[in-house]
Amino acid sequence: MLIYLCFMFFCGVWVFCSNRGHLLITLLSLEYIVLVNYLILYYYFYFFDYELCFVVIFLTFSVCEGVLGLSLLVSMIRSCGNDYLDNYIMLRC
């Protein structure tokens, strides 16, 4: 099971590093990495019979991170008109 989770994590990192065109794709790959980290943390705590309170705290922080990313995406689309990262660097919006 750990091998599958590590493979999923590195696939998410690969997508994050290779796709830099849209901000939305970048944010989705970051959310995928956070969800894989959540699964790894959950299985670790469940396997060693720890309390699962930290998993809830981690999930809360990951939701806050997702909301912050979406708010940045909306503000970027409202100011520049699209979410292309290449145009954002050239236009200096």
Image (cartoon, helix red, strand yellow):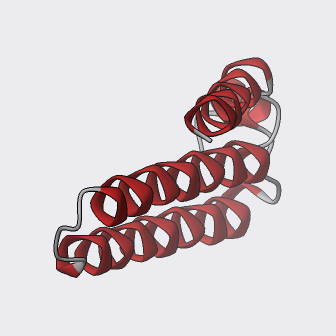
Left or right of 57 on screen, residue 84? right
Q: Position of residue 11 (x, y in %)?
A: 73, 28
Indicate the quadrant where residue 91 lies.
top right
Residue 43, quarter of the rendered image: bottom left
Q: Residue at x 23, y 67 (%)?
A: 49
The structure residue drawn at horizontal position 69% and vertical position 70%, both measured from the top left corner, is 78
From the viewer's side, name the closer residue of 75 and 16: 16
- Give whichever of 79, 1 is nearer the camera: 1
Q: Quadrant of the C terminus?
A: top right
Give how far across and how far down residue 87 sits, in percent.
Answer: 78, 32
The N terminus: image quadrant: top right
Q: Nearer the viewer, residue 43 or 31?
A: 43
User: Can you give x and y, in whole percent of width and height, for residue 40 in the image?
Assistant: 45, 50
- At horizontal 28% and vertical 61% (from top left) the residue drawn is 45
Q: Residue at x 25, y 77 (%)?
A: 52
Query: Compared to 39, does 40 lie above or below?
Result: above
Q: Is residue 69 left or right of residue 48?
A: right
Total tally of numbered discs in the picture: 0
User: Could you tell whether 65 is left or right of 33 in the image?
Assistant: left
Seen in the picture, residue 93 relative to 43 is either above or below; the reply is above
Q: Position of residue 67 (x, y in %)?
A: 49, 75
Q: Please tell me which residue lies in front, 32 or 23.
A: 32
